[in-house]
Image (cartoon, rainbow, N blue to C red):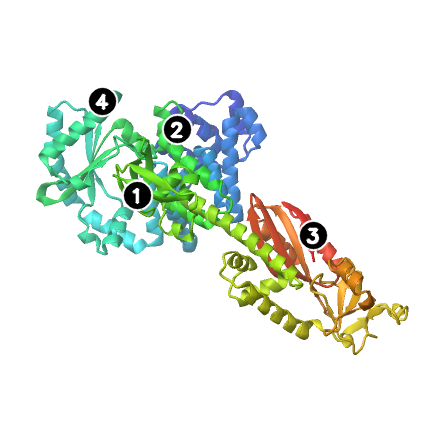
Amino acid sequence: MKDLLARLKELYNIEFSSVEQDFLAAQELSSDEVKRRGTIIDLAISEIGLGKTAVTALLVRDADATMIEKAFGEQTAKIVQGLKRVEDLYHVNTSLETENFRKLLLTLAEDVRVVLIIIAERAALMRSLNEQEDSETRKAIARETSFLYAPLAHRLGLYSIKTELEDLSLKFTDYDTYKAIAHTLNETKQHRDAYIEAFITPLKKKLEDLGFMFSIKGRTKSIHSIYNKMQKQNTTVDHIYDLFAIRIILDSAPDKEKAECWQVYSVIADMYQPNPKRLRDWLTIPKSNGYESLHTTVLGPEQKWVEVQIRTRRMDEIAEKGVAAHWKYKGGKSEGGMDEFLKSVREMLESPNVETKDALQDFRLSLYDQEVFVFTPNGDLHKLPKGATVLDFAFAIHTGLGCRCVGGKIGGRNVPIKHILHNGDQVEILSSPQQKPSQAWLGFVCTSKARNKIRQALKEQEFKDASEGRELLERRFKNWKIEYSEGDLSRLSKKFGYKAVNDLYQALAQGKEDILNLRDKYIEMTDNTMSQTNIVSASQYVVTQPQETSKGASDVLVIDSNLRKVDYRLAKCCNPIYGDPVFGFVSVTKGISIHRADCPNAAQMKERYPYRIIPARWSGKAVGQQYPITLRVVGQDDIGIVTNITSLINKESGVLLRTISIDSHDGLFEGHLTLLVDDLKQLEQMRKKISTVRGVKSCTRQM
């Protein structure tokens, strides 16, 4: 550790006080680990531009957070906490394509330096990946790097590292292709260098004569970039002609940067014919990650197209080191575009109903997006990804406006909500209070904010429709004096082709299902179920308390082995189970129905038909007999809570989970679970255990 601290002081002028050195020396790290962290620190400082705070967090990341805050301050402690959160994700699952991805975004939104550090760690890992003996592990790490870390590096402006991560990912996932491209580049290097020299020499002399201070160099395109061109153009590397670009880096004063870049462009345009369709101006309006440069494509010697990039020394450092370089030039403040990016991340986190896999894909796609610039009627500028529509623009202005958007006006003419916007469009949003988001909207919006808000609105509408449909059904069943059962409705919904009972409720509310037809099917199904499963023969029962069977046998229905040649059923309105206080009700056509003493229909039956009431009690239980019951669970709509509940049930021997339906709204979820249990005692044990699950507010038995 002492050697590493000495090197930090000598190479990077990072010095620690004696108290801080003592704290660092107390860290129990092996020599290999100190070496590994030293490699990451070199990369983080020299290639990303991180400073002492981030370096310290890397060195003390295993220490106690409270002790770190006392020794090094709050900022270092916060970065360490963020690093530990990311590390915890990998203890759970080595892939970030999980529910934990939301936590990584949250960490990013709190402090970008955490993500810069994990990018540095990933770059160091990829550089040493050859040391990993298992080829499948190498491929898995490379795939994840290509999927998430390279796009993250791109979005944070770390173009050099992003390029390296992409090339190394290709090397370990498709070595043959990587080797073929590298071999071709190596074979053509001499001719390529000669061409670059022929292009640069007259240009260099002209710029020197005009008094510019600059450096100029040729740059071969990355192997991964060439590979992408091969895929898009469906060709081989031999037929890819624009394999390199020229970069001119000016030593300009801050107040002359833009003017001198445009002057150099004018010189190049005079010497070589430019392609006007290939001019990219990121000087006037930089990219959201802070990238500033002027790109043009010109026709060089031998009639070959050559890309030329014009930027200043400051712009080049920002292009190489990304967001970290902004702190150097802006006095510790983040660049405005990056603030917008982090704001979009926070908005994504505010939508708890959005599926994490959708959020991951939206976020990843947004990392590479090119941008278009559009204006409001008042002249306010908005940056949107290329391919954004009028609807994306409406959501960018305000969520409420997006939900009510019916179209827009561009240049005085009406355009639909799916109209794709172009640079410089001035857009007026048209709205209607009757408009509502639809599923089709997800097919043409491209911003993560629009997608998240549309999904959120659709879920809210689904919840509202399901509630209205359920209330309608319960009310009509009550009028028809039909016993309402959530379990039976769930089975019926499957027969109707719905995945869940809530889908059936929504169809009722939206008028897609005829309630009279539903009633007839429900009665038919429950009648069949009663005749097949609910008429229980007394021969199935075993006596557990034979001494009770003789007491009051003449006027009490005892459900045990003495009950013969009597057809009875367990009432659906209250679903009694073994152990419940019960009574019998003699029906006209269906024998005796057994009801719980607290059945909601008990008072009415006893008042209107007292002569049909038969006292009853349990005396024995059928061997292997289980009873369906429904539990209503209410809790916080946290990630994983439903999984925790179902896992708890599955671990219980003798308890089966038959159906489950979940609704969520305003941060709460309401679930109805139909279980098969042995008796009342087992039911109560199960109910108490579910109540102890973290986040569960109540767990009650339903009639």
Question: Which mark is in front, 3 or 4?
Answer: 3
- Mark 1 or mark 4, which is nearer the start of the sequence? 4
Q: Are marks 3 and 1 in contact (CB under 8 Å)?
A: no
Q: Type of residue at label 2?
A: Ser
**Residue at numbered disc 3:** 700
Q: Position of residue 500 (x, y in %)?
A: 54, 60
Q: Position of residue 609 (x, y in %)?
A: 79, 65
Locate the C terminus by quadrant. Answer: bottom right
Dot 4 falls on a residue whose secondary structure is helix
The CA distance from mark 3 to mark 1 is 51 Å
Q: Are marks 2 and 4 in contact (CB under 8 Å)?
A: no
Question: Which mark is in front, 1 or 2?
Answer: 1
Looking at the image, which is closer to me, 469 or 700?
Answer: 469
Question: Which mark is in front, 2 or 3?
Answer: 3
Q: Are marks 2 and 3 in contact (CB under 8 Å)?
A: no
Dot 2 falls on a residue whose secondary structure is loop
- Mark 4 or mark 2, which is nearer the start of the sequence? 4
- Mark 2 or mark 1, which is nearer the start of the sequence? 2
Q: Are marks 1 and 2 in contact (CB under 8 Å)?
A: no
Looking at the image, which is closer to me, 51 or 10?
Answer: 51
Q: Position of residue 612 (x, y in %)?
A: 80, 68
**Residue at numbered disc 4:** 256
**Residue at numbered disc 2:** 334
